[in-house]
Image (cartoon, grey):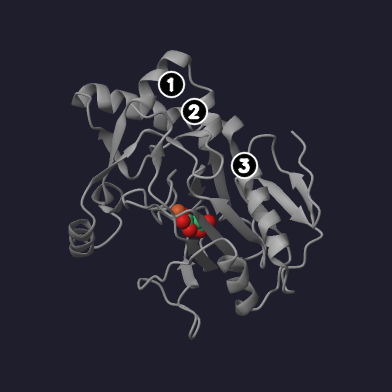
Amino acid sequence: MKYIYENFKVQAATPTIGAYVQDLDLTQPHSPALYEELRRALSDHKVLFFRNQNMSDDRFLELGHSFGKLEVHEFFPCPENKPEIQIITTNGGRTGTDRWHTDVTFRPNPSAASILRAKDIPADGGGDTMWLCTNAAYNALSDPLKTMLNKLTAVHDMRLGMTGYLDPAVVEKNARENPPLEHPAVIAHPITGKPHLFVNSIWTSGFRDLPLEESKMLLDFLNDHIKRPEFQVRLRWDVDTIAIWDNIATQHYALGDYEYKRVMNRMIVDGVAPKAFLAA
Ligand SMILES: O=C(O)CCC(=O)C(=O)O
Ligand SMILES: [Fe+2]
């Protein structure tokens, strides 16, 4: 489908997910109408990519605030007086984000969106990020399976994804503060109303009302099903590339195929409690 935008050009990366936003200079301030159009482009394409945006932290914050209230994170370092910007440094290998996931689904209100800017990316490649569309993954299922999933509730458990990646004492503390909780297995997107499969490989422990064996079988199937390349897009980063993703509409995977310092700046937009696509 072709969408019309007034303030910038949008080049779809795939028919399903991802788009490059062109003819837009984010180093300059912009009108509320332009940011509104950017939010529409995000709804249309689920992930937006911007190249060569050598913007100040103030402009970066303006971009973040235009998508909603920004999370303040105590865990990561930040630029001085800008606690909404997280500085995330990794060295490749098993970072934990090299697994398909939607961010923080163990929270009652998982993030609505994330904004990531590459600050230091060596020229040799590696450290790409991939996204997949959870609406396309849902739509590709058979009607009988959709009907079943529409009625199921999934359990999300922070301990599951963190164990083995963080110090056991840190896992314990975090798990105590975030006990397991439930979300519908298929949610209605809060903006578009479309159905999205809402289970992922690192936080979802199973389905509340299924016996263990059936729960495991179904979850394993879904976590395999979502990996079809037709649902995915892949971004090669350059310094000052920015990606904005709709967290509820997607899963992502950060490749660990590099051995250098990779530095990113990140902002997280607060979300709402996911609602079932079909009320039981
Ligand atoms: O570093 C990346 O490319 C993404 C890492 C990730 O999972 C996140 O920022 O939520
Ligand atoms: Fe993530």
Residue 138 has which mark? Answer: 2
Residue 94 image offset from top left, x and y in percent = 40, 54
Q: Residues within 10 Å of mark 2 (few under 14, many from 20)?
A: many
- The correct choice, above or below, for 276 with respect to 23 in the image is above
Residue under numbered circle 3: 233
Check disc 2 and give the amino acid type: Tyr
| Residue to which mark 1 is pinned | 146
Nearer to me, 218 or 145: 145
Q: What is the residue that sits farthest to the top in this orientation?
A: 144
Q: Is mark 2 on a helix, strand or loop?
A: helix
Q: How far, Cα to Cα, is label 1 from label 2?
A: 7 Å
Name the quadrant containing residue 174.
bottom left
Residue 122, picture quadrant:
bottom right
- Identify the residue at horizontal 42%, vertical 13% (top origin): 144
Q: Earlier in the sequence, mark 1 or mark 2?
A: 2
Query: Crowdedness of circle 1 by 10 Å Cα count: few (<14), some, many (20+)?
Result: some
Residue 141 placement (x, y as % from top left): 49, 21
> Residue 191, how many percent across, how many down?
54, 45
Q: Quadrant of residue 25?
A: bottom right
In this rendering, the count of numbered labels is 3
Q: Are the two marked residues, 1 and 2, in contact with CB atoms closer than 8 angstroms?
A: yes
Is ligand 2 within 8 Å of the beta carbon of the residue shown at mark 2? no
Circle nearer the viewer, 3 or 1: 1
